[in-house]
Amino acid sequence: MRLTASEALALRMSSLLLGPRPGPHPGTVAEVVEWFGAMQAQDVASGIWSLGARLPAFTLSDVQAALERREALRTWPMRGTVHLVPARDARWMLELTGVRSLPAAATRRAALGLDEAVADRAVEVLGSALAGGRLTRARCLETLNAAGIGTDGQRGYHLLWYASVRGVTCVAPNIGTEQTFALLDEWAPDPLRPERDEALALLARRYVRSHGPVTAREFAGWTGLTLTDARRGLAAAGDTLTAVTVDGEEMLVDGALLDATPVPVDDVRVLPGFDEYLLGYKDRSLMLDPAHRDAIIPGNNGIFQPTIVSGGRVVGTWRRTIGKTQVKVGVTPLAELDRPRTEHALARYAEFLGLPLRVDWPA
């Protein structure tokens, strides 16, 4: 099947749960995270709003309560980056894709004055300290220091990352503004244990259904898998995926989406910077004008600005300042913006936070 760019964009927004789609829409935190398989969440506030943007009846406290119920957890399942993942899937994802970041860790450890023996000792110390509870990041570092394991500079972050990638710890919900850690075995006591090919197929199905249309290279880039393994997973996913052609390039999409004519997206969304809408792809040309790339990723440093999206395309950025009595949002247009609809979308964000909204527009 041949698709125009606008049809492909409509399908992609549907896959991302940002546009109309056939069938029931995932209605809980657990269902949304499972739909994606993994959701970018290196910035906790962005990760929480990524969920809120797809759960229109939820508030901030609703999402936080779901995470406390362990409907999903945060860890480093792929690309050395924190994601939200279904709790039962965390272990097999770490074993399939997370460990691919470990070989480079030796070089990083050497630069930090660490070695593998010290890192493994840190894992043991954290494993014992976290038994039966959870600790803030500061307490974890204090525990390591008390055991004679220095955490100055970036050493502490590296050791906390290493313990999670090794499958011993995970990132638990914040206590106030403080990050916390817990034992993965305690937060996900009943893990799924798929065989490797089954795990590849499961991850491939979830990526395509939540991001498609996509290519094998996009899947490899998202997971950090080799292109060979990415293709193996897509092939193992079988006939749940359907091939389409977009601008002469073959892509894959969830076959269920093709049961109806793609419906163009005609709404305005405000999304966090670290959202699968952009982070889930290497080629973002369907959603982002190349001329606006530097405005979204200033300095090409991996820090993505929050976006205003109209009809599936980035048309501006927004920045928020959360106070005790209101949330103030500054808007920067990159293209023509519908001001009332943009303010309506921002009002949904303010409602999510439970705060009055003030919008500052450029003069």
Image (cartoon, rainbow, N blue to C red):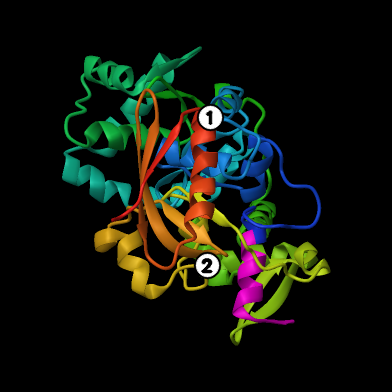
Look at mark 2 in the image and give the residue it sits on: 218
x 65%, y 33%: residue: 191
Question: Helix, strand or loop at disc 2?
Answer: helix
- Number of the label disc, if any, that sits on residue 135: none
In the foreground, 162 or 333: 333
Tell me: 293 left or right of 348: left
| Residue 205 x, y percent position in the rendering | 68, 58
Query: What residue sits right under mark 1 in the picture?
Result: 60
- In reply to whether residue 33 is colored magenta, the answer given is no
Q: CA distance from mark 1 to mark 2?
A: 31 Å
Q: Is residue 19 visible?
A: yes
Q: Report the side of 334 relative to 299 (left or right).
A: right
Q: Point out the stretch of residues depicted in magenta.
A: 1-13
Residue at image x 47%, y 73%?
285
Where residue 225 sits: x, y (%)? 50, 60
Mark 1 packing: few (<14 Cα in 10 Å), some, or many (20+)? Answer: some
Can residue 212 be seen by looking at this rendering?
Answer: no
Q: Residue at x 64, y 62 (%)?
A: 233
Question: Residue 21 sits in which quadrant?
Answer: bottom right
Q: Quadrant of the N terminus?
A: bottom right
Q: Closest to the observer: 123 or 216?
A: 216
Q: Secondary structure at mark 1?
A: helix
